[in-house]
Every structure is written in structure tokens, then in C-alpha cells.
Amino acid sequence: MPTVKDELKLAKSEAAYKEALRLMPGGVNSPVRAFKAVGGTPVFFARGAGAILTDIDGNDYIDYVGSWGPLILGHADERIEAAIGKASAKGTSFGAPTELETHLAELVISRMPSIEMVRFVNSGTEATMSALRLARAATGRDKIIKCAGCYHGHVDSMLVKAGSGALTLGVPSSPGVPKAVAADTLVVPYNDLDAVEAAFRAEPKRIAAMIVEPIAGNMGLVPPQPGYLEGLRAACDRHGALLIFDEVITGFRASSGGAQVLYGVRPDLTCLGKIVGGGLPVGAYGGGADLMTQMSPAGSVYQAGTLSGNPLAMAAGIAMLEALADAEVYSLLELRSRRLADGLIDAAKEAGVATYHTRAASMLCMFFTDGPVIDDAGAARCDTQAYARFFHEMLTRGIYLAPSQFETLFVSVAHTDEHIDRTVAAARLALARVAEERARTNHGR
Ligand code: PLP
């Protein structure tokens, strides 16, 4: 169990980071890991077990990142480990069909009512990229609507952000994204149906699809307002466009059938990732057979992958979905998540720090603002410095949170009541420090 230390000793992580910086851009293979949003040295990990991560200096942490969502069973779950071991003993990749792919496809299709056929890929990004290609091919249209603050992987056309106003033509938010590609992306605020209607009206019969995170998890956690997802379904139907749910985070987490089951809204295409691979690199996209049979080689829309559906990843995904077939998993997650959310709300109140709390199933967020946060503009009002302070205070107390305010906190079945209570106790102390610092800074002004 992690212990509270006055000062976190990270000498080995610091040395490892220095070396990594020399060899890899920013020292990491995915940007958020570099702690840019909170400062300090990224922690290098040696191992994980259940809810606990251990770094290379020997410090333990209660982990709420869970590899950014996949680890709903916790680290090194023995069912997943056994499945991977068994599969790897038979060979790591054949580049040819296996029965494991069909087995995982059956499991996915049985849980998600909108999916009749599925294609496995290697990441969430590949899933969204391919679903967008299919949507464009199926409709014969080029334009896509996305929401500001929703992340759909690093696909060129999705790397655009909104400017001011309800509806903005896409502007690339990364160098290297061609303007012409970005211009086919229309950006609207999350939870704003009027803006979606305006986008459809502005580009009649030119919009192939609206892609959305049914529960937004990349601007902090922002659940859909009542009627929002139903409204998107109706708008897409009215305008002959496809509705794509990006369930890379929410798939098999929001409920056993993802957000689409939780909210009872059926998308045309669903993108999956994270949990579906049991912690190995897997993505997937699926939908009705009429759409999916347009993919090569059944149809003419091309998409391929050397390692797609590889046996290790499929075996891990199967073990994961089989473990999640137990309905008790979701009731347990609900209990633990509620305990944590309630504890954090009380802790913030006690410390007198203005916060806005969101939760959807086992995903939650504490925004450092008095809220409400229903879109990216609301999220942008957060005091990110206060979050950074909170993050480091928690890290020192053995709690590993996402190194950014604009991420989601993930609860796993490996989190016990004791873990949660220790986390809340740490949050009380951390928030008291945030309050002290605020008082000091305000005093100084
Ligand atoms: N879609 C959503 C909603 C995500 O949160 C992510 C990644 O966090 C992606 C797509 C991209 O997935 P990957 O990082 O596996 O490419």
C-alpha cells in the first residue's frame, strides 16, 4: 500500500527521463506522458499489480490512469496474463486468419446492439480514421462534423479545434495537417444541438458524418446533456449523414455495451479501442452489415493492417470481455466510483476550493472551476495551475492521477474501498495545500 512521504524521491525517474530525452522527442512516445501540463519529471514505472503502480525508484501509487482507460480490471490481471501467455506460446503473429478473431468479433457484436460486423485494427486512431473513410465512401460526401474538445486520435482531419462562435470551419491545430484536409472538418461545441443543425444547414448534402464521443473524456469528463445524443441521431437522420460514436474510452466501460447501451442511442458506426484489447494495442470499428461489407475485401473501401487481429491482442481482448460478462463488475465499479466521487466532493467543500464534479459510470473528473462544464469553453475556464498543484500533492501522497486537468480519472475493479478512502484522505490534504497557496497568492496581489 502506498505510504505518504514528505518528499517524493524520483532520482531514477529523473535519470531515465534525461536519457529518454536524448533519444526520443520529448522523451516519450505519446505527448501527455511528458507532464508538460503539470510540470516536473514524468514518473517511469517498473510494474503494476491490481490498483497499484510501482515506479523505478520503488515508490508505490494508487493508479487512476489505468493506461488511459483499458485497465478496467487493474494491472496484471491474472486472467489476461494467462490468456496472453497461452497465445504467445503458440506464436505471436501469423498474418493470416485465426479463430481468436472470430471469437472476439462475436463477443463485441453480442454486447453492442448497433454492431453487426466488426473490423479489428491496432489503435483507436486507426479505428476512427477507417470509420471516417467508410462514412465518406458510403455517403459519397466529404465533410465531417466533430466537437471542440473531443479527441478522435491523431488522424489529420480530426486534429482541428474550434475558434470562437458556434460553428467554425476547421483550422489545423498541428503543423503538418493540410489546410484542405482540415477544411473538410466542421467543429461545433459539445452539447450544442443548434450548432449541429447550423453546420448541416451550412453544408447541405455535403456532410458525410458526425463523429462524437458519446461521453466526452478528453476535455476532462463531460457527459452528454439529456437529449443530446438523441438529438444528434435525429439530426443525422434528417440530413442523410451517418452518426459515428467514438467509444474508444466508453466501450465496455460506460456499460457492458458502452455508452450506446447506457443512453439507448444507436450510432451507424462505432469506434472501439483500449478495453477491447485488454491492455494490448487493439482498435476496432463496426456497424451494420450494409456498411461494413463495403470494406475491402468484401467491398472496395480499402483498409488493412499487418498485425491487425494478431493472436496476443485477440486473446487479451477475449479474456477481458469474458471477465466483463459478469454483471457484478459494473455494479462494483458503480459503488467504488460513487464512493470516490462523493469523497472528492466533500474534500473540496471542506477545503473551500471551488470545483465542479462530473461522473459517468467509472469515469470521473474534478474541474478546478465553479462550473458548470458542459463543453470545451467551460473546461477552458479551469484553473490549470491549481490542478498542477493538486496533481503533485497527490503524487507525493502516493496517488497517480492523469498529468492534466483535461483528462478523466478511471476507476477499476481492483480499487478497493480502502484504496478509495486513502485517495480521499490524500485529496483532503492536497486540496488544503491548494487552498493555502491560493490564499497566499491572492494576498500577495
Ligand atoms: N478516440 C478517443 C475517444 C480517445 O480517447 C483516443 C485516445 O485516447 C483515441 C480515439 C485514439 O486512440 P489511440 O490512442 O489508441 O490511437
Image (tube, rainbow, N blue to C red):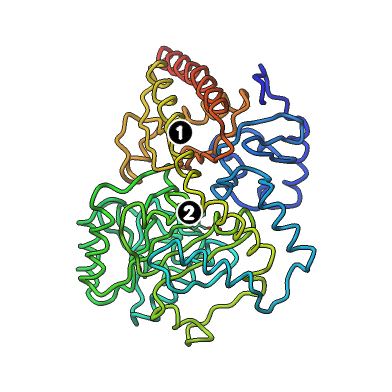
Q: Where is residue 370 in the image (x, y as percent from the top left)?
A: 32, 29
Asked if residue 55 lies left or right of residue 370, the reply is: right
Mark 1: secondary structure: helix
Q: What's under tag 2, amino acid-wise?
A: Phe
Q: Where is residue 123 in the image (x, y as percent from the top left)?
A: 57, 62
- Check whether the beta carbons of the residues at disc 1 and disc 2 lie within 8 A of each other: no
Q: Say if 59 sits above or below 136 in the image.
A: above
Mark 2: secondary structure: loop
Q: Which of marks 1 and 2 is nearer the N terminus?
A: 2
Between 239 and 266, the one lying in front of the other is: 266
Q: How many marks?
A: 2
Q: Say if 295 sits above or below 425 in the image.
A: below
Disc 1 designates what residue? 384
Residue shown at the point (58%, 45%) measured from the top left = 73
Which of the two marks, 1 or 2, is nearer to us in this view?
2
Q: Where is residue 359 in the image (x, y as percent from the top left)?
A: 39, 38
Residue shown at the point (45%, 33%) measured from the top left = 384
Q: What's under tag 1, amino acid-wise?
A: Thr
Q: Identify the mark at residue 252; answer none if there is no mark.
A: 2
